[in-house]
Image: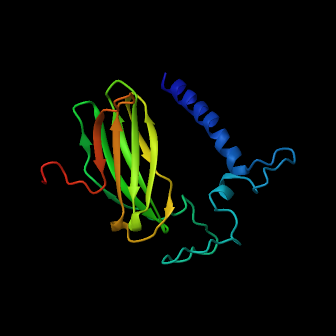
Amino acid sequence: MNLRLIGIGAGVLIILSLPLAGAIAGPDFAGQDDGKGGGLFRTLGLSDPARTSPAPAGRPAAPAGTERTGPAEQPRTDSRCGPELSSPHGVEAQTCVLAAEGRTWGRSYYRNTSGRELDAVLAMMGPAGRTVQIRCSVGAGDEPGLCETPKEDSAGEPESYSAVAEFAVPDDEGRLLLRSGSNSPAPGDG
């Protein structure tokens, strides 16, 4: 019985190894190439010793014959957020001012468990009376979402910006259910 299980296991291992062996060998089937030089080793940057990647600032250069792999470095995004707030009507939100690469924008993260669609208005106020406002439709449901203003060129320090999101019932009265701000004090902070 054990010999039979070993044979089946070896067969499964061989079958599972074939696609990996094909990837390592490369996609050059019958003279067709994918235009990338092919192969798993090339994809991982292990097969071309003549190529090296320039090192990003502050990092040592990759040794000859290797390439850096992985995701590209993302620019740092600074954020200043108000507290996470919730209303007895089933709306939760947190509003932030974000800044990166000389651009500033407002964002409100929300969750709507009220059972009905809502309207949200997100306004970002900046220096010299600059204001950007956007309206977002907030679907009914428990899935988190976000409302975001367009990214604008920064006109001052990030501290000179603030954002406010208001969530309301979309009817004639427009009853306000929750207001969330980027510089709001936490509940109980006065």
**Scheme of image coloration:** rainbow
Which of 57 and 121 lies nearest the eye of the viewer?
121
The one nearer the camera, 148 or 13, is: 148
Q: Taking 123 as reference, is 101 left or right? A: right
Say left or right for 14 vs 83. Answer: right
Say if 132 sits above or below 91 in the image: below
Left or right: where does residue 144 sit relative to residue 67?
left
Say which quadrant the C terminus sits in. Answer: bottom left
Q: What count of labels does the image hold? A: 0
Q: Is residue 68 above or below residue 147?
A: below
Q: Could you tell me residue 168's position as x and y percent?
A: 34, 35
Report which quarter residue 43 is drawn in.
Answer: bottom right
Judge from the rendering whether residue 53 lies leftward or rightward of residue 73; answer left or right.
right
Q: Which residue is pictured at 86% across the width and 44% down the height?
A: 30
Observer-nearest residue: 167 or 35?
167
Q: Quadrant of residue 19?
A: top right
Task: Mark yes or no: residue 88 visible.
Answer: yes
Residue 166 location in percent, x, y? 34, 42
Expressed as whole percent of the image width and height from the top left, the position of residue 59 reads 49, 76
Give the x, y percent position of residue 117: 40, 28
Residue drawn where x is 46% and y is 47% of the image: 134
> In the displayed image of the protein, which residue is found farthest to the top?
1
Asked if residue 77 can be seen in this view, the reply is no
Residue 101 versus residue 23 in the image, above or below: below
Q: What residue is at 58 percent from the left and 36 percent from the top? A: 13
Q: Residue at x 48, y 78 (%)?
A: 58
Q: Examine the rendered structure and indicate whether residue 8 appears above or below residue 147.
A: above
Residue 88, quarter of picture? top left
Give the residue at the far front of this rendering: 172
